[in-house]
Amino acid sequence: MGYSQKKKEQKKKATQPKLISAVRSNWKQIWPVLLFVLGFVVLMVLFYAFWLSDYSKNNFQPFVVSVNAGISSFILNLFGMKTMTIDGTIVASRFSVSIARGCDAMEAMALFGSALLAFPAKWKFKLIGFFTGIAILIALNILRIISLFLTGLYFPTVFEFMHVEVWQALFIIFALGLWIFWIKWTKKEISHVA
């Protein structure tokens, strides 16, 4: 073996540990992200497997719609709206609004819950964030239903815009913002403990 070839071999051996070290370092940074994405995807697939099942369509979804309609109608009646519910529809003398799949906030809750549960954090923080976040999203959805009822009653020309454009986007943005807030809260709580 000649001198130049020996030099090339030595240089190759010297760069291999650096390359291996770099790959390991990158893998340590990428691995948590991959776990998060995989966990999120698995949880969303499980949600949709349930959500699109016959059991969910025939039993769970009508129950959720009925509960949303009932709570919203109750709150509207506290303000003298004189509403009642019939099969997930809030009915008044001048206007009625039907709550259907997609108006129940379940998909936004699933996105929030899946992202939160897949995120690498202590279970204590996950459970606090999950139950608090879901409660906030349920309350926001009730507010959405009430505001849409009132929009349809008093401003019927903008009802469709509010329903499809404004509230759909606001709900997804709010769920994402709630998740980001939870991440920041979790990091802050962990730094206080440490």
Image: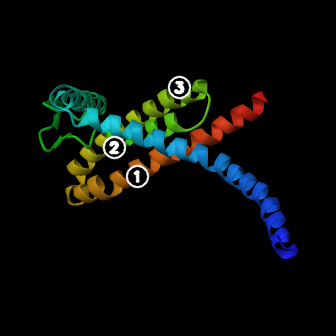
Distance in Å between CA atoms under marks 1 and 3: 24 Å
Task: Classify residue 106 as left or right of residue 36.
Answer: left
Mark before the other along the chain sequence, 3 or 2: 3
Is there CB contact under 8 Å for labels 1 and 2?
yes
Foreground: 22 or 96?
22
Residue visible at 78% across and 57% down in the picture:
18
The kind of residue tagged 2 is Arg
Q: Is residue 140 visible?
A: no
Is there CB contact under 8 Å for labels 3 and 2?
no
Which residue is the site of mark 1? 170
Which residue is the site of mark 3? 127
The kind of residue tagged 1 is Leu
Q: Is residue 86 above or below residue 6?
A: above
Distance in Å between CA atoms under marks 3 and 2: 25 Å
Q: Secondary structure at mark 2?
A: helix
- The 10 Å Cα crowd at callout 2, few under 14, some 14 to 19, many 20 or more, is many
Picture coordinates of residue 176, whole percent (x, y): 48, 47
Mark 1 or 2, which is nearer the eye?
Answer: 1
Task: Classify residue 84 as left or right of residue 26.
Answer: left
Foreground: 67 or 127?
127
Classify residue 51 by image quadrant: top left
Q: Is residue 147 visible?
A: yes
- The 10 Å Cα crowd at callout 1, few under 14, some 14 to 19, many 20 or more, is few
Picture coordinates of residue 7, whole percent (x, y): 85, 70
Classify residue 175 by image quadrant: top left
Mark 3 or 2, which is nearer the eye?
Answer: 3
Q: Which mark is residue 3?
A: none
Which residue is the site of mark 2? 144
Foreground: 80 or 144?
144
The kind of residue tagged 3 is Leu
Q: Secondary structure at mark 1?
A: helix
